[in-house]
Amino acid sequence: FDKQLFCLARRQHGVVSRQQLHDAGCSPDKLTRSVSTGWLVRVLPGAYLMAPSPDTYEMRCSAINIWLDGAGFISGRSAGRLLGLARMRKRPIEVTLARRHKRMNRAPWVEVRQTAWYDGNDDRQRHNAIT
């Protein structure tokens, strides 16, 4: 992997998307080898932790944002925790998802709430982190 990808991973708490890996020249075969050798760890569908990055709350939140890809956002107590409210619990990480999206393959530490008021078509930059 190149230095630019490591810098990106550092900004995203060690997590990169499958698309970011592809854009950096990582073929599907190299992705498979990197997972089998432990250089990458699949956190959620399409989100990979680069070794030797630690498994932290912020890393998991970053992985969730990659996994959701604009279809939802971190919400509730989890959003409060990211904003610095230390008394907010870390698990499960609460996510609000547009009702029309079905995300069945999630980790046990993610709690998904679906809603009709958010359609997932809002500005992705504005909703890419928390509410």
Image (tube, rainbow, N blue to C red):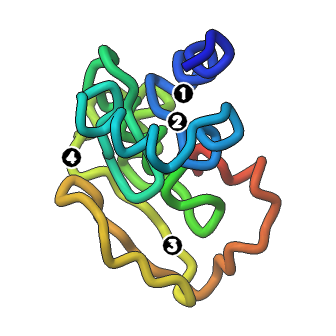
Q: Residue at x 52, y 36 (%)?
A: 16
Is residue 126 or residue 38 the one in the foreground? 38
Q: CA distance from mark 1 to mark 3?
A: 21 Å
Picture layout, residue 81 above or below residue 3? below
Q: Give the number of the disc on residue 91.
A: 4
Quarter of the image holding residue 38?
top left
Quarter of the image holding residue 63?
top left
Residue type, mark 3 in image: Leu
Q: CA distance from mark 3 to mark 4?
A: 17 Å
Q: Callout 1: helix, strand or loop?
A: loop
Picture layout, residue 93 above or below residue 60? below
Q: What is the crowding at mark 4: few (fewer than 14 residues within 10 Å), some, or many (at least 20)?
A: few
Decide: marks 2, 1 in contact (CB < 8 A)? yes
Q: Earlier in the sequence, mark 3 or mark 4?
A: 4
Q: Callout 2: helix, strand or loop?
A: strand
Q: Earlier in the sequence, mark 3 or mark 2?
A: 2
Picture layout, residue 67 above or below residue 38? below
Q: Give the number of the disc on residue 97.
A: 3
Decide: marks 4, 1 in contact (CB < 8 A)? no
Disc nearest the viewer among 1 and 3? 1
Disc nearest the viewer among 4 and 1? 1
Specify the quadrant that holds the N terminus.
Answer: top right
Q: Residue at x 31, y 32 (%)?
A: 57
